[in-house]
Amino acid sequence: MAARKTKPSSSPESQPTPEPQPTPESAVQPPPSVLGRLRGNRMGAVLGGLVVALVLGALLSVLVPDSQLLLALALLGLAEAAAVGFTVRYLSERRGLAPQLTAFGLTAIGVHVLAGTGLVNQQIGNLGDLAGPLGGGLTSGLGWDDALVGAMATPAISTGAVVCGLIAAIIAGWGPRGDRHGTSGDPAA
């Protein structure tokens, strides 16, 4: 019996497709932005969140009122939590426990700087007003920079910092669950 020779099929699957040659315009790519480089770095979310927490905490500490209104402190803390939570969420590659813990810790630090600096600055100013009539040297109180140093030197454990940290952790981890917790396609499940 003679072996039968088969002709190569002329189907589109068997023919190799030519790859398009890159044009000179498409070969040049712009360098990544600062946020793009932060996203590509393993510690980028931590660095971005820390910068936002400290800068925003220091800036918002000026808005802490003299009378220490709870509503004002709560709103300032929520602004801090939202800013840090969304920063960590945007800069993190994945959702999970690590970004949530990052957002929690950084927000607790930022809220502590905000509240500690604002309250200490207001209270030291009030003490300076009391010492003025007594002939003391504190006529205008200590400044904002001394209040910031005082806030950095004290521990950051307070209920407000923990609550704001939890809010930032929720923001950083919000989204649908991963594949192992997703729907299986079974309506009864």
Image (tube, rainbow, N blue to C red):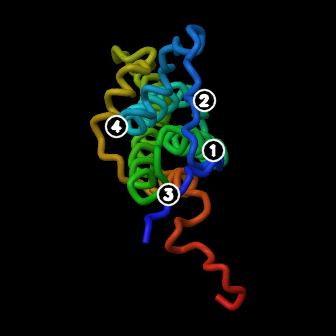
Query: For the residues marked 4 and 1, what is the alpha-carbon distance in whole angstroms?
Result: 36 Å
Residue furthest out toward the front? 1
Residue 169: assigned label: none
Identify residue type, mark 3. Lys
Mark 4 and mark 1 lie on one chain; the one further toward the N terminus is 4
Q: Badge 3 is on which residue?
A: 5
Considering the numbered disc 3 on the image, is that residue within a helix, a strand or a loop? loop
Nearest the viewer among 4 and 77 is 4
Query: For the residues marked 1 and 2, what is the alpha-carbon distance in whole angstroms?
Result: 11 Å
Nearest the viewer among 71 and 110 is 110
Position above or below: 6 against 52 = below
Q: Nearer the viewer, mark 4 or mark 1?
A: 4
Query: For the residues marked 4 and 2, what is the alpha-carbon distance in whole angstroms?
Result: 31 Å
Q: Badge 1 is on which residue?
A: 69
Residue 43: assigned label: 4
Query: For the residues marked 3 and 1, what is the alpha-carbon distance in whole angstroms?
Result: 91 Å
Q: Quadrant of residue 81?
A: top right
Task: Decide: few, some or many residues near mark 3? Use Cα within 10 Å; few <14, some 14-19, many ≥20.
Answer: few
x%, y% of residue 187?
Answer: 72, 86
Identify residue type, mark 4. Met
Identify residue type, mark 1. Leu
